[in-house]
């Protein structure tokens, strides 16, 4: 029964069942190559086996290891193999020897997904190292690993999922998609995401991208599938929901009230960065009576010297913010932050003094530019930045009614999206 349970683990592509024979002696090794050091297995187990003459010598040799044990039950055998042990079978007797391999040389620090608390390590561009990190954090026998090769270059990808929690319909849907993939070169998680998306023109991310092992483990425990890609430290997580992109790995660490407050702050920031520019244009151009008299007069006074309509102001400032953001990415890291900060200050002041924009416009542009970075996942930034411009156009043409129509159309569009066949817009689902 124990042997059958161990052999069931062969559905994992990184699980090894290796038989070794010498005359009348025969033993079988069971282990995960992503958890154990195969060189030590060869040097300390397989090579000495060929030098032994009797089985009694083998048992004595196994007992010479510091961390060895005699396996008595099915549960113990499974626990040992998932803790980096090699299970040795001979004549219906099971022994375990710990030859764990924990990678540290290929592990770097996560720089693009910073957190205040929690681990700082990131995944690796080497799939074996990434798999080692994940298996050491998620030690469940239901974790399944499947290898696939895609593209003419035969890029190796690895699918990880919890067989007990993952929806079989999602797996079937994904396998059908992978069979139809025809691509020359596959090099990154973003490229794989575009291939797997149903709507090629959709600019909202259908999969989470991350380089953090703790986020991977949390999503595995929620029944999601992880895509490891050879040559990329970034992995895909799916199916994803809209609210997944507003979660930070600091949230589970914080006190419950603080965590909920931080999540609500992110949704407020989403509303500001998405709708504030459009409503500014709509109110200034069509409905200034919505504002208090003093505030409306203040804005009108600031705009006396501005020769352009309000939509030109906001689009001009937002484009300048986009240019500064792109410049900060392309410039060398040693000067990018100072150059973009000074450039933004000089640009805003000069534009205001030249009469191209009003002072209130600078405040609006600053609030919009800052609030976008409150959203934790960078992929969602890009989608929100694109949506702002159609909303501004609607606000400039039809006023507040146009912005409202745009918001309803956006919600309807999001509700129609699917990630691996699952609804995308589930804001209040328990996960």
Image (cartoon, helix red, strand yellow):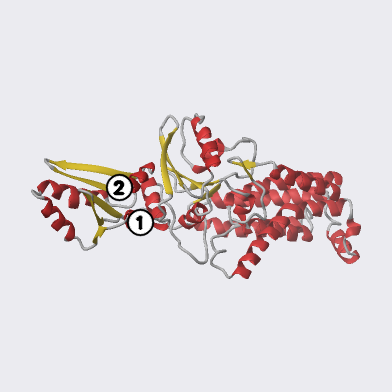
User: Eyeballing the image, is 192 above or below 401?
Assistant: above
Quadrant of the image containing the C terminus: bottom right
Decide which of 94, 46 is in the foreground and name it: 94
- Label 2 packing within 10 angstroms: few (<14), some (14-19), many (20+): few
Q: Provide residue 409's location: percent of width, then percent of height.
A: 77, 43
Q: CA distance from mark 2 to mark 1?
A: 12 Å
Residue linked to disc 2: 3
> Which residue bears the numbered disc 1?
75
Comparing 298 with 414, the one in front is 414
Residue at 48%, 64% in the rendered image: 118
Tell me: 155 left or right of 207: left
Nearer to us in this view, 124 or 281? 124
Q: Any mark on residue 377, and which? A: none
Measured along the vertical axis of the image, is residue 284 above or below residue 118? Answer: above
Question: Which residue is painted at 36% across and 47% down in the image?
Answer: 128
Q: Position of residue 356 (x, y in %)?
A: 78, 53
């Amino acid at each position: 029964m124990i042997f059958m349970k161990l052999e069931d683990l062969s559905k994992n592509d990184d699980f090894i069942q290796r038989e070794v024979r010498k005359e009348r002696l025969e033993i079988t090794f069971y282990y995960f190559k992503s958890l154990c050091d195969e060189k030590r297995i060869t040097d300390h187990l397989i090579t000495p086996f060929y030098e032994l003459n009797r089985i009694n010598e083998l048992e004595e040799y196994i007992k010479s290891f510091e961390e060895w044990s005699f396996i008595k039950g099915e549960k113990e055998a499974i626990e040992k193999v998932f803790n980096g042990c090699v299970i040795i079978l001979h004549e219906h007797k099971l022994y375990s020897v710990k030859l764990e391999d924990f990678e540290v040389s290929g592990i770097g620090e996560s720089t693009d997904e910073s957190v205040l608390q929690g681990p700082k390590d990131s995944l690796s561009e080497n799939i074996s190292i990434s798999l080692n990190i994940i298996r050491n954090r998620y030690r469940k026998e239901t974790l399944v690993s499947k290898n696939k090769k895609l593209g003419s270059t035969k890029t190796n990808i690895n699918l990880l999922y919890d067989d007990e929690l993952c929806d079989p319909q999602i797996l079937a849907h994904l396998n059908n998609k992978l069979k139809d993939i025809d691509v020359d070169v596959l090099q990154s998680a973003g490229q794989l995401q575009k291939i797997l998306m149903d709507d090629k023109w959709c600019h909202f991310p259908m999969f989470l991208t991350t380089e953090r092992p703790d986020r991977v483990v949390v999503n595995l425990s929620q029944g999601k599938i992880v895509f490891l890609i050879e040559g990329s430290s970034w992995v895909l997580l799916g199916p994803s929901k809209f609210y997944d992109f507003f979660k930070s790995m600091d949230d589970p660490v914080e006190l419950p009230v603080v965590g909920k407050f931080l999540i609500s702050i992110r949704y407020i920031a989403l509303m500001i960065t998405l709708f504030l520019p459009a409503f500014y244009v709509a109110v200034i151009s069509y409905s200034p009576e919505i504002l208090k008299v003093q505030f409306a007069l203040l804005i009108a006074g600031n705009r006396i010297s501005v020769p352009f309509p309000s939509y030109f102001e906001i689009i001009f400032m937002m484009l300048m913010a986009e240019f500064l953001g792109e410049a900060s990415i392309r410039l060398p890291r040693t000067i990018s932050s100072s150059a973009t900060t000074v450039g933004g200050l000089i640009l805003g002041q000069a534009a205001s003094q030249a009469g191209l924009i009003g002072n209130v416009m600078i405040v609006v542009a600053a609030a919009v530019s800052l609030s976008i970075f409150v959203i934790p996942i960078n992929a969602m930034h890009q989608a929100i930045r694109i949506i702002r411009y159609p909303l501004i156009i609607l606000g400039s043409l039809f006023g507040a009614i146009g912005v409202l129509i745009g918001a309803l159309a956006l919600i309807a569009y999001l509700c129609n999206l699917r990630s691996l066949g699952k609804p995308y817009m589930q804001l209040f689902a328990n996960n």
